Amino acid sequence: MSKVRTSSGGIAGMPSAVLQIPILAVLIGSWYGLTETNVLPKFFFGEPFKVFGVIWAWFLSGEIFPHLGVTLLETVLAFLFGSGLGLAVGLWLALSPTASRLADPYIKAANAMPRVVLAPIFAVWFGLGVWSKVALGVTLVFFIVFFNVYQGIREVSPVLLANARVLGANAAQLLRTVYLPSATSWVFSSLHTSVGMAFVGAVVGEYLGSSRGVGYLILQAEGVFDINTVFAGMLVLTAFALVLDQVVAIVEKRLLVWRPTHGETEKM
Amino acid sequence: MAMTQTISPARSAPAAEAAVPALDLDNVTCTFRTPGAKASYTAVKEATLRIADGEFVSVVGPTGCGKSTLLNVSAGLLQPSSGTVRVYGEELVGMNRKAGYMFQAESLMPWRSALDNVVVGLEYQGVPRAEAEARGQDWLKRVGLGAHGHRYPHQMSGGMRKRAALAQTLIMNPRIILMDEPFSALDIQTRQLMENELLDIWSADRKSVLFITHDLEEAIALSDRVVVLSAGPGTHPIGEFVIDLPRPRDVSEIRLTPQFVQLHDQIWHTMKEEVLKGYVQSQNK
């Protein structure tokens, strides 16, 4: 999951923001124009300035923070448990061919199942609080990390393994110095996707039944046909997801310094 | 077949038979069973090879003839189907703890810096971190990477990575060094530099070296003895030549001496047929 990022825009090397902000303005402008002229009914499509008003009020009163906090907590817990579990099971199955052979059809079945349908069951099992959302997030994150680690371990260079053995590594040292670093590098490379999935798990879980969280706000607003608040919730979630993605990008950069990047040159 | 015209002043001719050899492959056969296929493939057949203590032996042979198999057997990474491997007289069981192995492919851990890669063997032995780092730094200096210990493998050139791999192997102070075409991926200038450095380091404490290469010139320039292998399958040594060129040698200059050319002609004569055989076989595969 590597993305090619360009820091400067294509048109005459202008900073991307200079070109990107007008696009946003055009989008919001046409939203405003189409709803004001009733080409799109306000009832279904909301009014941009009222949406911004709702967001403003949320942040001004501080009402949004406990909800954001809950959603963030669910996301982080789901990510930690999901990737921990994925790493452990991935390592185990990759290193044990017998276990892998036995588990194979079940893993495939579990992965093929649309796991969002588990949300009602988790709500019954774990209640309407934080844990039912964490459980849903875990099922989503687990498979991403698991498959990455499993593949990563099986593709560890045989030369690296042979070299470590010649240098005197025992089984535990081999696991610690070759398999684990190799596996974690695969976990990190799936970081963007898995954090995103943890977030999806949290919001979908909240939306299907909860007492707090941004998903809950959307659910409540939808119940009274307050379309502006629904849009406000969506925008807050989007902004929040972007912030999470940035945090992940920074963490990734720190942790993967050893990884070659294309066209990297060193300043003398 | 051995040539005994002059005896190099640095040391007497290797007494391969007299003393206990450092490495003794006796009648080694390696047969691989490919999963799914009925036929098995015999890479090495009844190969016997002895390396005396402190001797630098090169093994040359056509491509795909099972040279690396011989090394893997010597390192203990691979169990021979039949035959025995003895290390200083003792039969080899499990990994060869007296040997260091330099691989043809990249063997540095990409997530470790050069220094951390060099000290990894000491780490396995439980040497305290500070001492390991001091020794690692010392070895980095010896291979000319003193200022580059913090670099990750992808930030180093191919030659630098090979130097780091050399330091990683030699820091363990192995009595036997196994080298599998270690310089084959380098350009010719870097390669000759590395060869000279290897000879420098080797002459300091005369370890036993089993050096595998497909490059006859490299083999002659470096070694005390060159062993020629037959084309695979069923590879075995078919000729042995004592290289009595005087040491210390400069690998880029020694290639021009008449003695070198004469040796090259002789060995090439033995090798040529096998190379052609290997070529035909690789085409028919």
Image (cartoon, coloured by chain):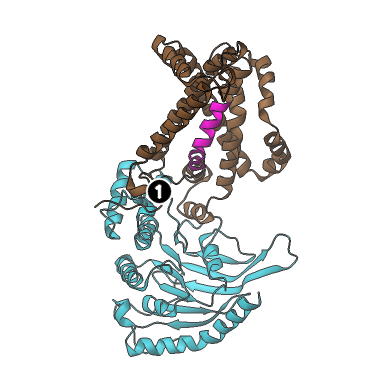
- In percent of width and height, residue A130 lies at 56, 16
The answer to if B75 sits in the magenta stretch is: no
Residue B246 shown left or right of residue A75 in the figure? left
Magenta part, dominant SS: helix
Instruction: Residue at 48% x, 67% y: name it.
Output: B23
Chain B: what color? cyan
For the record, the magenta segment spans: A184-200
Chain A: what color? brown
- Taking depth in this image into account, of B73 and A140 the one nearest to the observer is A140
Work out whether residue B3 can be spotted: no
- In percent of width and height, residue B268 lies at 47, 86
Check the image and name the residue furthest to the left.
A268
* Three-letter amino acid code of the residue under disc 1: Val
Find residue A221 and report its image quarter: top right
Chain letter of mark 1 equals B
- Taking depth in this image into account, of A39 and B64 the one nearest to the observer is A39
Label 1, residues with CA under 10 Å away: few <14, some 14-19, many ≥20: many
Work out whether residue A196 can be spotted: yes
- In percent of width and height, residue A243 lies at 43, 28
Q: Name the residue under label 1.
A: B120
Instruction: Residue at 52% x, 77% y: name it.
Output: B61
- In percent of width and height, residue B28 lies at 60, 70
The answer to if A186 sits in the magenta stretch is: yes
Q: Is mark 1 on a helix, strand or loop?
A: helix
- Taking depth in this image into account, of B239 and A184 the one nearest to the observer is A184
Position of residue A210 relative to residue B79, above or below, is above
Position of residue B192 relative to residue B245, above or below, is above
